[in-house]
Image (cartoon, helix red, strand yellow):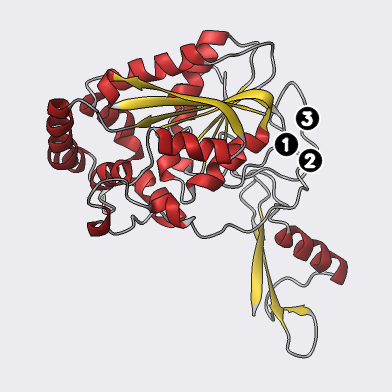
Amino acid sequence: MGFAVTIRSGLGRDKSLLLSESPAGPAMPNPGRQVISSEKKRLLREAVARCATIAVPARHDVPRAWPVGYSFLPSKPIHQTTRSMPPLAEPHPSATEPTSQHAAEISPLDKSGVRVREMFRQIAPRYDAMNHLLSMNVDRLWRRAAVKRLQVVGQSPVLDVCTGTGDLALAIEQRYGSSLSVIGSDFCYDMLKIAREKDAQHRVEFLEADAQQLPFPDNHFQCVTVAFGLRNVADTDRGLREMTRVCKPGGQVMVLEFSTPTLPVLKQSYGFYFRNVLPRIGQWFARNDKSAYQYLPESVGQFPSGQALLDRMQAAGLQRTKAKQLTFGVASIYEGFKA
């Protein structure tokens, strides 16, 4: 068996190294590929083992990965990028458990990274327009309400994970000014390209990163946020733990997410719209082969809400957790503070 490592020069001259494991000894370079020294092979193996990268970004508008020792934070360099990262695990069984009374009839939703990334890549060009259309622009009010609840003190950086096209990250920067460093991360490059295009003045740093394995040191951000993205993370609990890990002690972790209305009449009418009308409109205007707008109500229906999500936030290491319903419970803001 073997593995391949691609070195990206950022100048369009990528080099591919393929190492194969010989039954009789250590890895040897494949015939026809570039031969590298044993010392380089050792370093490459160490890099792969700790899930680090030896590459510099191949695209300069949106970093695709964080090189060792490289920092996009203007205020304070990051030096702990060699921290050992465990491999991505299968989702916790409860992370995909349906929360409705028909749980037994609902099969677990496919939230694999490959499926979700490709889904958002396909709908990226019309993502913002569809969000505003299907929510009748109420989603803007929800983000505004979330930003108002942030407890920003001083100039320590703020992180928005699963930032998508950057709406929440840009709203945070707009409210608190350029003196505050705001970072937006997402694992879908095509969404981040749109975020960068919207940020013509380069006020926010956008980078490609997995929410389950954030490339930041412990205790670095005063606030860590996520808007309508946590339910797309394969392992909800791991995502919450990573958000908590990179948050400073006493710092705030905030989740803005869809929830289920509590008023009976609204609950029924909203449920009908969400399950039957929204997917048809969304699929028609943002055509894709991943049924993105069928995935939306399914992911919301199977995502923990209310006290169930607060319990998970507490298990991740947060305290003083609370939830605030928006628009009669159609969406909710969850927040907690790191002990």
Number of other residues with Cα within 10 Å of mark 2, as a class: few under 14, some 14 to 19, many 20 or more: some
Q: Secondary structure at mark 2?
A: loop
Count of labels shown? 3
| Closer-to-camera residue (235/207) | 235
User: Earlier along the polypeptide chain: callout 1 or callout 3?
Assistant: 3
**Residue at the extreme right:** 39
Determine which quarter of the picture holds residue 43.
bottom right
Residue 59 in sight in this render: no
Which residue appears at 38% of the width and 41% of the height?
304
Q: Give the quadrant of the N terminus.
A: bottom right
Number of other residues with Cα within 10 Å of mark 3, as a class: few under 14, some 14 to 19, many 20 or more: few
Q: Secondary structure at mark 3?
A: loop
Compared with residue 221, is residue 216 higher up or lower down, i.e. above or below?
A: below
Kindly indicate whether the residue at mark 1 contacts the one at mark 2 (C-beta within 8 angstroms): yes
Circle 1: residue type: Asp
Image coordinates for residue 34, horizontal then vertical, percent: 73, 70
Q: Give the quadrant of the C terminus.
A: top right
Q: Is residue 225 left or right of residue 50?
A: left
Task: Identify residue for label 2.
Answer: 80
Q: Is residue 98 left or right of residue 85?
A: left
Task: Identify residue for label 3.
Answer: 77
Which residue appears at 27% of the width and 33% of the height?
260
Task: Identify residue for label 1.
Answer: 218
Image coordinates for residue 19, horizontal then vertical, percent: 70, 74
- Check residue 10 in the rendering and tell me which mark sits there, or answer none: none
Q: Nearer the viewer, mark 3 or mark 2?
A: 2
User: Earlier along the polypeptide chain: callout 2 or callout 1?
Assistant: 2
Q: Secondary structure at mark 1?
A: loop
Circle 3: residue type: Pro
Circle 2: residue type: Gln
